[in-house]
Image: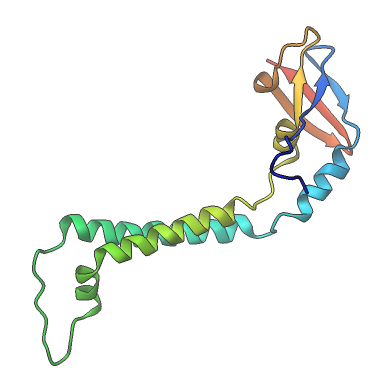
């Protein structure tokens, strides 16, 4: 693991032409190590928790904005669920926001594609030394081999 003071040293790939097939030594090992730290169902579970959190937060916010100023209920039977929502829109909104934040945290543990991983770990340089990572189109072929073209 890296310490907080250590910078992530970004490797670079020097492109010879505007399009071609390139070998990236050590890429498959780096990607396999990355996949070990990812959760397999993180995209689905994180998305579900985000959706539930957004829905709960929307109910709380809508009740704060459009809810009644006074609430009356029967003292014998107590308030209904809807009346509890009207009484406590702030905490409901907070719980929804917390669930949404938890969902985004879970969703972030989703594995990215090989192409995205390559762009985050490697800098693509043209033959003149210019960084062309934002202009590159990548396609994974197999092993450590990528087809890289510049547009």
Looking at the rendering, which quadrant does residue 82 occupy? bottom left
Q: Residue at x 88, y 44 (%)?
A: 29
The residue sitting at 57% across, 61% down in the picture is 45
Give the side of residue 10 with respect to residue 107, left or right. right
| Outermost residue to the top | 128
Residue at the limit of the structure toward the bottom, as seen here: 76
Residue 96 vs 30, above or below: the answer is below
Q: Nearer the viewer, residue 90 or 42?
A: 90
Percent of width and height locating residue 98: 43, 60
Q: In this rendering, would 57 be left or right of 33?
A: left
The total of numbered circles placed on residues is 0
Residue 68, by quadrant, is bottom left
Q: Quadrant of the C terminus?
A: top right
Q: In the orientation shown, which residue stands out farthest toward the front? A: 5
Relative image position of residue 11 (x, y in whole percent): 80, 28
- Quick one: 90 or 39, which is closer to the camera? 90
The quarter holding residue 44 reads bottom right
Compared to 85, does 142 lie above or below? above
Q: Residue at x 20, y 69 (%)?
A: 86
Q: Considering depth in this image, is 111 or 151 the residue closer to the camera?
A: 111
Asked if 87 appears above or below 37 in the picture, the reply is below
> Which percent across, then down, holds residue 61?
27, 56
Q: Position of residue 20 (x, y in %)?
A: 83, 19
Judge from the rendering whether residue 56 lies leftward or rightward of residue 34; answer left or right.
left
- What's the colour scheme? rainbow
Give the residue at x 75% y 24%.
Answer: 123
């Amino acid at each position: 693991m890296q310490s907080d003071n250590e910078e992530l040293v970004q490797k670079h790939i020097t492109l010879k032409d505007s399009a071609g097939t390139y070998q990236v030594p050590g890429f498959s090992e780096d990607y396999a190590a990355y996949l070990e730290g990812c959760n397999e169902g993180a995209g689905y579970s994180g998305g579900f928790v985000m959706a539930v959190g957004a829905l709960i937060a929307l109910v709380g916010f809508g009740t704060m904005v459009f809810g009644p100023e006074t609430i009356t209920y029967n003292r014998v039977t107590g308030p209904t669920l809807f009346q509890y929502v009207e009484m406590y829109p702030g905490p409901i909104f907070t719980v929804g926001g917390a669930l949404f934040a938890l969902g985004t945290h879970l969703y972030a543990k989703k594995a990215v594609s090989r192409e995205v991983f390559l762009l985050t770990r490697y800098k693509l340089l043209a033959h003149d030394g210019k960084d062309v990572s934002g202009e590159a189109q990548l396609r994974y072929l197999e092993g450590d081999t990528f087809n890289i073209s510049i547009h």
